[in-house]
Image (tube, rainbow, N blue to C red):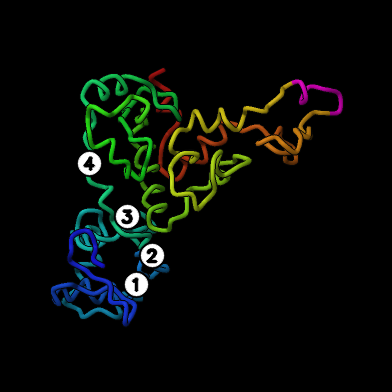
């Protein structure tokens, strides 16, 4: 098994990644310290500890100006997905998966692209920096390779930063074979169809956020919440996708809370995004 560039291969006998050509000493030493598994996932490694294991000649590739060992598309970032903390003068790093074939740009039929690019982001409801996104983050449907077989329903408008966030979650899904759990955003259910191990994108929040919200709200009855004694503690019934309300809430997804939590980590200023409305 090799990485997407072919530069590194998995050695099952010793359980580690090594340069396929026997060279790339700096990268080999960094991988030996990180110890990513077959899926390309490792524990956190502090830069200070990493530097102690590297010869002085290689340390400049890890720290200082011009360091690019962990940047996407550069150094090890061509083959492995890295998470860094903090973002700038990093203190620790870990790998969260392998760069997959899916990261290569896929063609979108021009008329479909024009039609969707003029719409508002389906999550932020803004027209600022809108990109056309493939709904199915795995991009493993061969039909989409045929431009004439593509349909508008295969794509959605997303703000550029939101699209990057989605891309990271899709890459983690591919690496771990575990789909994103929308309960992390405050929803009552992680998926409206299937579960964490389902092999399709259908049912995942990121695949189609408007439909996800619609499916979870299908059994919502506002009259139950307004009924005497209902209030915020209304029990929507055993068959409801929403389930019973949590303490102090209605059990219904609050869009503002979700957006704030989703984009706080991405560094998005929601007030600035709404300025164009």
Residue 41: image tag:
2
User: Residues in magenta?
Assistant: 223-229
Q: CA distance from mark 3 to mark 4?
A: 27 Å
Q: Which residue is mark 4?
A: 105
Residue at the (40%, 24%) spot, across then down: 126
**Does 71 appear in magenta?**
no
Say which element carries label 3.
loop
Question: CB under 8 Å between callouts 4 and 2?
Answer: no
Residue at image coords 39%, 68%: 42
- From the image, state whether disc 1 or disc 3 is nearer to you: 1
Circle 1 residue: 34
**Residue contact between numbered discs 1 and 3, judged by CB atoms under 8 Å:** no
| Mark 4 nearby-residue class (10 Å; few <14, some 14–19, many ≥20) | few
Quadrant of the frame with the C terminus: top left
Distance from label 1 to label 2 (Cα)?
Answer: 9 Å
Q: Residue furthest right?
A: 228
In the image, 197 versus 62, the foreground residue is: 197
Q: Badge 2, how many Cα within 10 Å: few under 14, some, many 20+?
A: many
Q: Pinpoint residue 21: horizontal percent, then vertical percent.
A: 13, 73
> In the image, is residue 199 above or below residue 46?
above
Task: Identify the element where label 2 is drawn.
Answer: loop
Q: Looking at the image, is mark 1 or mark 4 nearer the viewer?
A: 4
Decide if residue 214 is in sight here: yes
């Amino acid at each position: 098994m090799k990485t997407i560039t072919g530069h590194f291969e998995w050695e099952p006998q010793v359980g580690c990644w090594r340069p396929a050509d026997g060279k790339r000493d700096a990268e080999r030493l960094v991988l030996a310290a990180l110890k990513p598994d077959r899926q390309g996932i490792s524990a956190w490694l502090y830069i200070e500890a990493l530097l102690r294991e590297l010869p002085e000649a290689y340390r400049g590739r890890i720290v200082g100006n011009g360091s690019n060992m962990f940047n996407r598309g550069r150094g090890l970032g061509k083959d492995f997905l890295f998470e860094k903390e903090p973002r700038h003068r990093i203190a620790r790093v870990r790998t969260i998966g392998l760069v997959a074939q899916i990261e290569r740009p896929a063609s979108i039929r021009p008329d479909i692209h024009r039609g969707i690019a003029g719409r508002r982001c389906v999550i932020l409801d803004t027209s600022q920096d809108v990109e056309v996104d493939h709904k199915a983050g795995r991009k493993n449907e061969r039909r989409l390779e045929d431009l004439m077989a593509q349909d508008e329903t295969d794509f959605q408008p997303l703000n550029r930063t939101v699209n990057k966030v989605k891309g990271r979650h899709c890459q983690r899904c591919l690496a771990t074979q575990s789909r994103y759990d929308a309960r992390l955003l405050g929803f009552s259910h992680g998926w409206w169809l299937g579960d964490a191990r389902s092999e399709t994108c259908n049912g995942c929040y990121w695949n189609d956020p408007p439909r996800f919200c619609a499916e979870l709200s299908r059994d919502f009855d506002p009259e139950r919440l307004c009924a005497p004694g209902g209030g915020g503690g209304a029990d929507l019934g055993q068959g409801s996708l929403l389930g019973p309300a949590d303490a102090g809430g209605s059990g219904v997804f609050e869009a503002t809370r979700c957006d704030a939590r989703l984009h706080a980590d991405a560094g998005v200023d929601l007030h600035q995004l709404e300025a164009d409305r």
